[in-house]
Amino acid sequence: MDSEVVDSESAVHSKRKEVMTKLHGGAIVDIGNVIIAYRFTDLTDKNYDTYPFHTIPEEPGAFEGLKLLNERFGGNVTIVWKATGDAVGKNMKWLQDHEFERRTGIQMTRIERMKGEDRAAKTRFIDQSSETYEGTTVVIDDRLEVLSHFIGKVPKLLLFRPQLKEVHKYAHTGALAHVKVVWEWSEIMKELNQ
């Protein structure tokens, strides 16, 4: 009888340990040109101060894709972006105007802005964690330079709608061979479901 009690307690302990062990997986996603679709605007340096930011659409499928990523990784999705000056307030207001948190399920506390740091600083979020998941398994960005800093550290690097000029600038690094170029959010979701 005593051995049955011990076996039962051991099974309960094992079950608790299983629950406490976090699953591996998470995403780091850029905001500009990945979530906010500047490509559909005539925004320039000259009209930046007066441009109605709230009218800029989201990338088609971005909010739906982010919601699925957030569900898949148990809230372990971090939006990391670099901005200075007026762009900070404009981007945060855009997220609020577009009901980002409600529509994606990603809490505003999971939005991280880099200030004066270089783009390599995005790698400090690799060990991100939520209640049930830890670590980063996918990074989505529109800059090859950014993704080059994740090579060998994150298994899935997705270069979203790359700017050819920027790709040519960093082509000598060999980084392009380590990323998957995607043009739509539907491609991102297909790539992640393989």
Image (cartoon, helix red, strand yellow):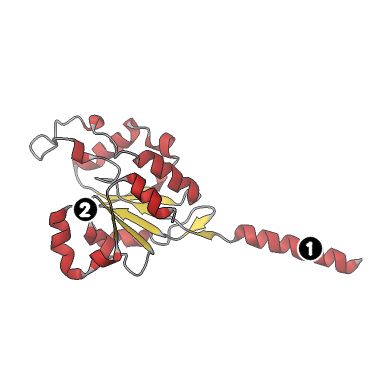
Residue receiving disc 2 = 162
Q: Find numbered disc 1 in the image and state the secondary structure of the residue it sits on.
A: helix
Q: Residues within 10 Å of mark 2 (few under 14, many from 20)?
A: some
Please determine whether, in this image, residue 46 is positioned above or below residue 70: above
Please determine whether, in this image, residue 149 is positioned above or below residue 59: below
Quarter assignment of residue 32: top left
The residue lying toward the viewer, choosing from 137 and 189, is 189
User: Mark 1, mark 2: which one is toward the viewer?
Assistant: 2
Question: Residue at 32% of width from left, 64% of height from top?
Answer: 150
Residue 16 appears left or right of 156: right
Question: Residue at 85% of width from left, 64% of height from top?
Answer: 5
Quarter assignment of residue 105: top left
Residue 12 appears left or right of 84: right
Q: Quadrant of the C terminus?
A: bottom left
The reply to whether residue 3 is in sight is yes
Instruction: Give the number of the disc on residue 161.
Output: none
Of pointers 1 and 2, the one earlier in the residue sequence: 1
Where residue 89 appears, x then y in whole percent?
25, 38
Please determine whether, in this image, residue 103 is positioned above or below residue 172: above
The reply to whether residue 118 is in sight is no
Instruction: Give the number of the disc on residue 9.
Output: 1
Q: Amino acid at mark 2?
A: Pro
Where residue 122 appears, x then y in whole percent?
31, 58
Q: Find numbered disc 2 in the image and state the secondary structure of the residue it sits on.
A: loop
- As drawn, the residue found furthest toward the left would be 46
Please determine whether, in this image, residue 75 is positioned above or below residue 152: above
Question: Residue at 17% of width from left, 52% of height from top?
Answer: 163
Question: Residue at 43% of width from left, 42% of height from top?
Answer: 67
Residue 110 appears left or right of 4: left
Q: Amino acid at mark 1?
A: Glu
